Amino acid sequence: MDATDPIRRAIVCTGNSHKVEELALLLDDFVLEPLAAGTKLPPEIGATFLDNARIKAYAGQELHPGSWVIADDSGLSVDALDGAPGVHSARFAGDDATDATNTDLLLQRLDGYAETQLRTARFICVLVAIAPDGTEYLGEGTVEGHIALERSGDAGFGYDPVFIPTGETQSFAELGAEVKARMSHRARAARALSERILQPA
Ligand code: ITT
């Protein structure tokens, strides 16, 4: 298999099943497979999304030599919090954090920032794909928005119930998977990645 094959199998190097579901809607040229249940990825000690995506992708490549592997590192950057939680988005509320405790802490930290323009934020996603021959491909995407005063909606994961993309009045969790697949940070990163794989520089 190489970059010119129309359909490629790829292992998605993540412990987050929501990412696999979203990427499956986005990366049409791949048939995606999750890591085996219980697979441990190395600690994400990188300073950037790219560093951490590479850590996950190369760990996956070691486990699955000869396969395409894809890793996603992503998070939320809030202007009023100087870019936090950033690369620490998954563990903002500590090592035992859940989506619920992370979101509670975010809303608490933004207490007193009542106006929309004081609550601006963006989601960022970096995708790293490694081909069977070792060639690395990158895709990055962002979506601008703001943090709502309270949660709304049930779809998605993570901070989706409090993230309202620019131009919308509802959160990603209300807008749902189809809208997210059009305009999310992950959707934009996936488009950039696919273009690079199909038309390498
Ligand atoms: P892996 O490292 O195993 O891939 P993870 O969930 O820990 O899974 P990250 O380290 O990339 O992944 O952290 C991403 C966190 O950022 C995620 O847990 C959410 O809290 C948040 N996040 C990223 N993308 C998001 C999205 O589309 N919607 C809501 N929150 C998102």
Image (cartoon, rainbow, N blue to C red):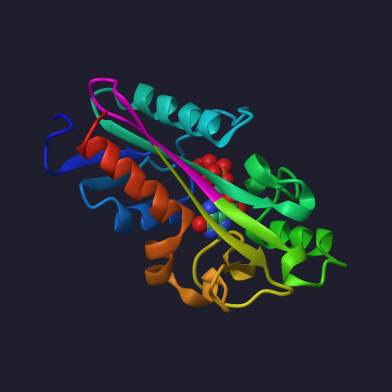
Classify residue 41 as left or right of residue 3: right
Using residue 186 as the reference point, say whether residue 198 is left or right of it. left
Quadrant housing residue 12: top left
- 120 or 177, which is in the foreground? 120
Q: Quadrant of the N terminus?
A: top left
Q: Position of residue 87 (x, y in %)?
A: 63, 40
- Counting every numbered tag in the picture gives 0
Say if 149 sits above or below 31 in the image. Answer: below
Q: Is residue 13 visible?
A: no
Instruction: Quadrant for residue 35, please give it.
Output: top left
Asked where in the image residue 168 lies, by quadrant, the reply is bottom right
Can you say whether 37 is above or below 112 in the image? above
Which residue ends up furthest to the right in the rendered image? 112
Question: Residue at 47% across / 53% down in the picture?
Answer: 185
Residue 70: tell me if it is visible: yes
> Of residues 46 and 31, which is closer to you in this image?
46
Q: Main secondary structure of the magenta part?
A: strand
Classify the position of the C terminus by image quarter.
top left
x and y, in percent, of residue 126 in the image? 47, 41
Image spot of residue 71 (x, y percent): 42, 38
Which residue is rendered at x = 78% and y = 54% of the image?
80
Magenta stretch encompasses residue 125: yes
Residue at 65 percent across and 57 percent down: it is 121
Bounds of the magenta span? 124-138
Residue 48 is a magenta residue: no
